[in-house]
């Protein structure tokens, strides 16, 4: 009889299970498990090849925790106007595959994986939780080195830009628990981290959903910006912060910047800077007109 595993040891158990590979020794995996993994990859590719563009925006457990103003714009947008860039589509694919690799390694290390993609429903909002590991709700995340630190260092509540905590809280609520966890993989170096947020760091998901639904009945977005502009060095200029740079609604959201002229965009050596206030003209090219069509 195999010893019963606990979620708390999953990372060290995965590392231990694959140590032999690093020493030049093979790992035995059943044909059944390999076929299961291959079938998932096939389904992942089919799903990825299905067009995402032009899908009507809808509230889901995976987006309910996003900043409220951003979510308002997202839900009110015309899907025909929101094209997904090719690099982002590629990122969706390998992120999805990496998350499946994590579950494969979890099972390889002797932990039990159940309830994969189980449908959950809270206040009419539907989601699909990744799984349970050893009976505990777990959400799998693939992350950049920057984002991975939020899981490995437990700082996610300080800046949860994608609303991961609300997502996990929704899965927990459906399962009658408040002790879920994230199992994250660093896309850049393969490092793993298990993070169990404190209950006080997670929102009341029922209240959150009701609030968002009410906001979506309004014709104007919530007045508070998701993130306030920050100083651009000592120039007296201000710019949108990192969290806003990649938002597709940043120009509409900041249309009142620069005395109603909107964001001004400048091409620096290694980045674009989106200025909300220009007190001192930067000594680089302004390319604002390129974004104004």
Image (cartoon, rainbow, N blue to C red):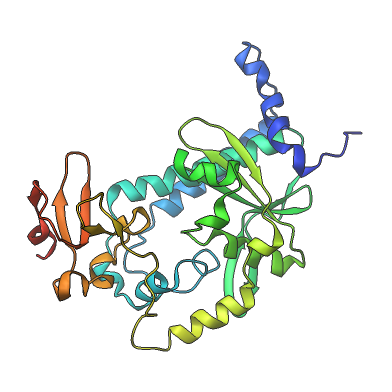
Q: Residue at x 19, y 52 (%)?
A: 235
Q: Residue at x 36, y 45 (%)?
A: 90
Q: How many marks?
A: 0
Residue 111 visible, this orientation: no
From the viewer's perspective, tell me whether residue 289 is left or right of residue 145.
left
Q: Residue at x 74, y 63 (%)?
A: 178
> How far from the left and from the top, in percent, is residue 259?
16, 74
From the viewer's perspective, tell me whether residue 270 is left or right of residue 92.
left
Q: In front: 122, or 248?
A: 248
Query: Is residue 131 positioned above or below 124 on the image?
Result: above
Residue 216 visible, this orientation: yes
Quarter holding the C terminus is bottom left
Identify the image quadrant of residue 34: top right
From the viewer's perspective, tell me whether residue 176 is left or right of residue 205.
right
Quarter holding the N terminus is top right
Identify the image quadrant of residue 35: top right
Q: Residue at x 76, y 42 (%)?
A: 8
Q: In front: 134, or 107?
A: 134
> How far from the left and from the top, in percent, is residue 181?
68, 52
> How far from the left and from the top, in percent, is residue 77?
31, 75
Query: Is residue 76 positioned above or below 41 on the image?
Result: below
> How far from the left and from the top, in percent, is residue 254?
25, 70
Q: Residue furthest top?
A: 24
């Amino acid at each position: 009889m195999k010893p019963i595993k606990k979620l708390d040891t999953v990372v060290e158990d995965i590392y231990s299970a694959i140590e032999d590979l690093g020493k030049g020794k093979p790992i035995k995996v059943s044909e059944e498990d390999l076929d299961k993994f291959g079938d998932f990859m096939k389904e992942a590719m089919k799903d990825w090849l299905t067009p995402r563009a032009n899908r009507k925006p809808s509230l889901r457990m995976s987006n309910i925790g996003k900043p409220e103003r951003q979510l308002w714009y997202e839900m009110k947008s015309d899907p025909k106007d929101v094209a997904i860039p090719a690099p982002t589509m590629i990122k969706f694919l390998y992120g999805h595959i990496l998350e499946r690799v994590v579950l494969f390694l979890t099972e390889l290390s002797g932990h039990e994986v159940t309830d994969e993609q189980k449908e959950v429903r809270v206040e009419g909002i539907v989601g699909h939780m990744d799984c349970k590991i050893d009976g505990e709700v777990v959400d799998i995340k693939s992350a950049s080195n920057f984002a991975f630190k939020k899981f490995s260092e437990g700082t996610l509540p300080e800046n949860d830009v994608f609303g991961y905590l609300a997502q996990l809280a929704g899965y927990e609520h459906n399962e009658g628990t408040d002790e879920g966890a994230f199992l994250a993989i660093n896309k850049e170096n393969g490092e793993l981290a298990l993070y169990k947020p404190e209950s006080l760091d997670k929102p009341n998901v029922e209240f959150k959903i009701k609030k968002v639904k009410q906001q979506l009945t309004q014709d104007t977005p919530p007045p508070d910006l998701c993130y306030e502009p920050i100083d651009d060095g000592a120039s007296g200029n201000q710019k949108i912060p990192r969290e806003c740079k990649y938002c597709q609604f940043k120009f509409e959201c900041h249309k009142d910047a620069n005395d109603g002229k909107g964001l001004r965009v400048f091409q620096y050596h290694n980045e674009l800077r989106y200025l909300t206030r220009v007190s001192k003209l930067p000594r680089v090219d302004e390319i604002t007109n390129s974004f104004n069509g």
